[in-house]
Structures are given as C-alpha cells and as structure tokens.
Image (spheres, rainbow, N blue to C red):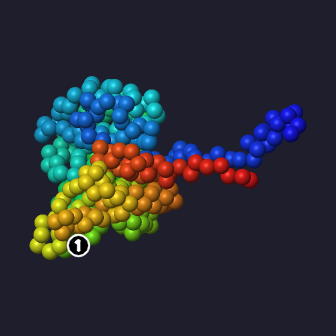
Amino acid sequence: MNLKLLPILIFTAISSFTVIGQKDPSFKIVGYYPFNQAMKADTTQVPFNRLTHIMLAFVNPDSSGNLKQNFAALSSFITAAHVRNVKVLYSIGGGTYVGQYHELLKDGKRQELVKNLVLKVTEHDADGIDVDLEEGYAFGANLDPNYGIFIKELAKALKAKGKLCTAALPSQPGNTVSHDVLTQFDFINIMSYDHTGPWTPDRAENHASYSDAMDDLKYYLNTLKVPKDKLVLGVPFYGHGFGPALNDPVIPWMIYKEIVATYPGAEWVDHWHLPNGYIMHYNGIPTIKNKTKLAMKECAGIMIWELTYDAPGRKSLLDAIWQAASANSRYNTY
C-alpha cells in the first residue's frame, strides 16, 4: 500500500459514516423524586444525565399556608442538577388527598399562598412549581371552583420571574381544568397509569397499557386541543397485583425494582405470575421503550413516577427511556 495515501483513505472512510446517538434536545424526560430524599441525596447517585426535569414531591403548606420544609437543604441537589442542565421544580399536592388547599385557595388566602410558593422558588434557585392537585381539584366528585383561578394567578406570578408552571393531570381531568386553565401550563404531565387498581378489583388487567397511553394522548390532543409540544406522557415504575378471585384484595403497590429483583426475567414482560396465584401488572422494558417512541411522535416527552422505584444496571427503565429517545449509536454508510 502507498503509505502516502493512508491519511486520505482514513479521512474518506470517516467522512462516509455518520454517527447517530444523540437524544433530541427538545424531548423532555421528567422524573419525580422525593423531596425529603433530595435534601440528603448523594448527588453523584442521582441520574441527572438521563433527565431534563426533576419534580420534587411533595411540597405542601400546613393548614395556615406556611411552607415549613427545609428548602436550604436542597442547595447541593439543585446546584448539581443545574450543572447538568436539569431543571428542578417543586411539586405541590400529591396522590393522597390534600384537603388544606380548599381553604387556602379561597380569595384572601390564595394570593398569600402564591406569593409564598414563588418566594421559595426564587430564594433557592429552583425552576418553578409543578401542580399535582388531584382529587377534589383536577378530578373527583366535588371539585374546588378556585382551582382554575389559583392556576392562573400562580402561572402569572411564576412567569413574571422567568419560572415554569407545570402540572400532573389525570387521563381525563374534570371541568375545573378548562381550556384557558390548560393554556397556563408550560407543559402537562399526563398521568397515564392507574386506569385500574384496588378501586376496581373486577378489572384485573394492566393499569398502564400501551393502548391506554395512545388513548390518553388522543384525548388531550383531539378533545382538549392541547398542542403536542405541551404534552408529556407519564409512565409508572410500579405495578398493581390482582388475585385469582374477584374478592381477593388487590396488591396496591409493588415497585419495579422489587419486581425485577424478586423475579428474574420480569423486566422483559408486562405481567408476572406470583407464587400466591396473583398476577402483577406493570411496564417492562419493551413497553417502556415503545411508549417512549410513541411520545417522540405524538408529544414532547416522557414523565416518570417515580425515579427511586427504578432498578439498577441493565434492568433500568430510565436507561430504556434514554436509549429509545436517542437514535441507536451506530455508524451508517451514505
């Protein structure tokens, strides 16, 4: 071989390949993380490199509207996130009923609550507020008429400071979440899970199927008319277990890392037959990847409830999301 030609041949070979392996920078990967754990977290163990946003759950006032959490203890967590270009929001509300908000959202108290929330965001360099007010606010039999007013005032106050206002909302929110309320959010995390559970023991099926995800996105896109760039598809890192008989109590919660640690191979399927005759329904790696691909086509990201439920190493669902959101790392010839 003519050695003088070698550099030219190498350059030609390299230039005839294209490297693909970067996640679309506009695609959001949003993870909920326990507020109390964030205060004491070893930040080297938090998967910031797989996330764009972290929602710290949950930050709620007492019945008088006081926020007594130790926000200063979050300083190292928020700094570590920002170094990796990850935004950190405080999430208010939660899956359990938070009745104190009914009083706090009334005129005369609501304004002080908004002021306090925005102050905690700006004082500690957080990036916004995520509203996860569920039963009695965004859905349920007796909805709070002040919910929408609160959202509008909170969003206005946050945006004046250059901060985000987001929400976690159910598959079909109640009438308090009107179109003008939906437009206030920078993005919406659709809780596309818990379609069945202990409250519906006769529906012994997956609580977060792929078809549920498609239906939930269609509802927000076509019925609620929310633009796709404001929607984030929620996925669960946990399962519900149903017994062989209808009168058997439903196992309300089994986190993903416990499932796959107990039952080898469970990460590759969406249900597992337990030794006691129960069937545990959850999302395994293939479905999580498929949902991520769906989200890349139909919305703006994936949301996770919640990050500490993930398994380490090759069984990680977060890694599966990242892999699906990134083009396969490979060389393609032209």
Mark 1 is surrounded, within 10 Å at the Cα level, by few (under 14), some (14 to 19) or many (20 or more) other residues, namely some
Please state which of residues 299 and 164 is positioned toward the viewer in this rendering: 299
Side of 53 where 263 appears, left or right? left
Residue 56 left/right relative to 248: right
Secondary structure of residue under mark 1:
loop
Q: Nearer the viewer, residue 116 or 75?
A: 75
Residue 125 drawn at (x, y percent): 36, 28
Q: Amino acid at mark 1?
A: Arg
Residue at 38% from the left image edge and 27% from the top image edge = 79
Q: Quadrant of residue 104?
A: top left
The residue drawn where x is 12% and y is 69% is: 248
Say above or below: 211 vs 11.
below
Where does residue 176 sit, x and y in percent of width and height? 28, 58
Report whether residue 19 is seen: yes
Q: Is residue 124 above or below residue 13?
A: above
Give the answer, above or below, for where 209 lies relative to 80: below
The residue depicted at 78 percent of the width and 39 percent of the height is 11
Residue 284 appears in view: no
Q: Nearer the viewer, residue 308 or 228?
A: 308
Residue drawn at the location 23% of the way across and 71% of the way down: 204
Viewer-proximal residue among 192 and 68: 192
Circle count: 1
Q: Quadrant of the N terminus?
A: top right
Q: Position of residue 124 (x, y in %)?
A: 33, 27
Which quadrant of the structure image shows residue 107?
Answer: top left
The location of residue 23, given as percent across then percent down, is 53, 46
Residue that carries the numbered disc 1 in the rendered image: 203
- Residue sticking out furthest to the front: 1
